[in-house]
Amino acid sequence: MFDSLQEKLTKTLRNVQGKGRLSERNMEDTLKEIRIALLESDVNYMVVKDFLEKVRQESIGQDVLNSVEPGQLLVKIVHDQIIELLGAKDSSLNFASEGLSKIMIVGLQGTGKTTQAAKLANLLKKQGRKPILLAADIVRPAAIEQLQTLGRQIDVEVYSEGIDVPVLAQVENGIRYAQDKGYDTAIIDTAGRLQIDEELMDELKNIKDLIHPEEILLTVDAMTGQDIVNVANAFNDLLQVTGLILTKFDGDSKGGAALSVKAVTGVPIKYTGVGEKIGDLETFHPDRLAQRILGMGDVVSFVEKAQEEMDMKMAEETANRLMEGKFTMDDLLNSIEQSRKLGPLSSIMRMMPGMSDMANAINDADADDQLKKIKAIIQSMTPAEREDPSIMRSSHKRRIAKGSGTRVDDVNKLCNQYDKMKKLVKSMSSMRSMFRM
Ligand SMILES: Nc1nc2c(ncn2[C@@H]2O[C@H](COP(=O)(O)OP(=O)(O)O)[C@@H](O)[C@H]2O)c(=O)[nH]1
Ligand SMILES: [Mg+2]
């Protein structure tokens, strides 16, 4: 999977690398080629559009690093955006804090529910949990037998009352049985259909409402094309799916549709099925997959290193200036950018003791807008104004507001904040010299 996408992306990006400088013009050409590569690999067109817009924005906003070729920088940007597209780093499952955790496996017929249910039981067992499998696809005896065979293979009990007891009753009994026997995780293998149908959806919804599962995992067959996105949406709308398992990832399809599912539904990918054998289930790591899709790990880590060095140098310079009581708008801009690299404001605050309440109240999108605004204002100032904002008259402020797409009010607010911070810096540096004496 992803062979042709990787080939095309790599070729496109190597071409830019050869060009030395990244201009508006060859950037457009490159973005066009990336667009074609993604579309030809079956990535959903809305997802492609978003993706390219983000790559474009990131590229424009990037500082030039002396030691890095612009083309290399673009590789890094594309790499980061693929990770963003694939979603959260945390693919771990939610478990009940005590008692039995319930994991429902749902999906269309043949997408690999039964197989992944057993693979997951096997994986959890290795992690020290006590799983049991519940057969909730009871229309065909063969489906139950399949689960029982897999269960024997991994030595995990399978609960089933055959094909005559209604499925909801079986699930209810099975959960009670699992609790009585001291199991900690019940994995429910549900029925599928070739297409979404109302009866199936009702059945799944009823099971959900009955047992309130900690996880509802949707198996998505990576070999299917674009329609997969609609199917995933339908399941998610009705059941509020908590995670995706992308199955048949070992196949030779183009894979782009599978990549789009997370972006379109917002549901995180938790596992990938990479073969028919019991051991063929992998916890999902977006960074690893991004590496595979792009295949330019050397360039990515090179740029990362250069960025880190640059960050350290800048942080050091800023710190030195602050020690001397100097603080310009450029310093303010630098410190904002440094702190933004740590992650969203709310997550930074969550790391600080006693700040979690405040962190919850923060809207990261708003905070982000605010920071963007400040950045735009400072970038619209002349070097002299950044050095000493007190030289600005009203006409200057009007020019800056216009240049940054903000209002004079915003410019004034920033100047006030700056003044306060400067005073703080001054008093800190004089305290420091007092201590030195
Ligand atoms: N290559 C490959 N085949 C898989 C994978 N997962 C399941 N299968 C196969 O897909 C077919 C359907 O799987 P099954 O679990 O019965 O699907 P269900 O109808 O959703 O329960 C079986 O032949 C499985 O062996 C996978 O990750 N890779
Ligand atoms: Mg099945």
Image (cartoon, rainbow, N blue to C red):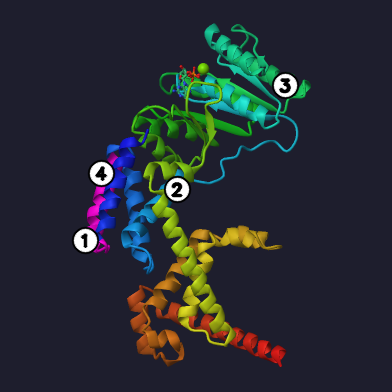
- The residue located at (46%, 91%) in the rendering is 390
- The residue located at (34%, 39%) in the rendering is 43
Amino acid of disc 1: Arg
Q: Mark 1 vs mark 4: which is more N-terminal? A: 1
- Are the residues at dot 1 and dot 4 in contact (C-beta closer than 8 Å)? no
Q: Mark 4 vs mark 3: which is more N-terminal? A: 4
Residue 240 in the image, given as x and y percentages of width and height: 53, 36
Q: Mark 2 vs mark 1: which is more N-terminal? A: 1
Residue at mark 2:
83
Q: Which residues are magenta?
A: 20-39
The disc at residue 25 is 1
Foreground label between 4 and 3: 4
Foreground label between 3 and 1: 1
Amino acid of disc 3: Ala
- The residue located at (39%, 91%) in the rendering is 393
- Tag 1's secondary structure? helix
Q: Residues within 10 Å of mark 1 (few under 14, many from 20)?
A: few
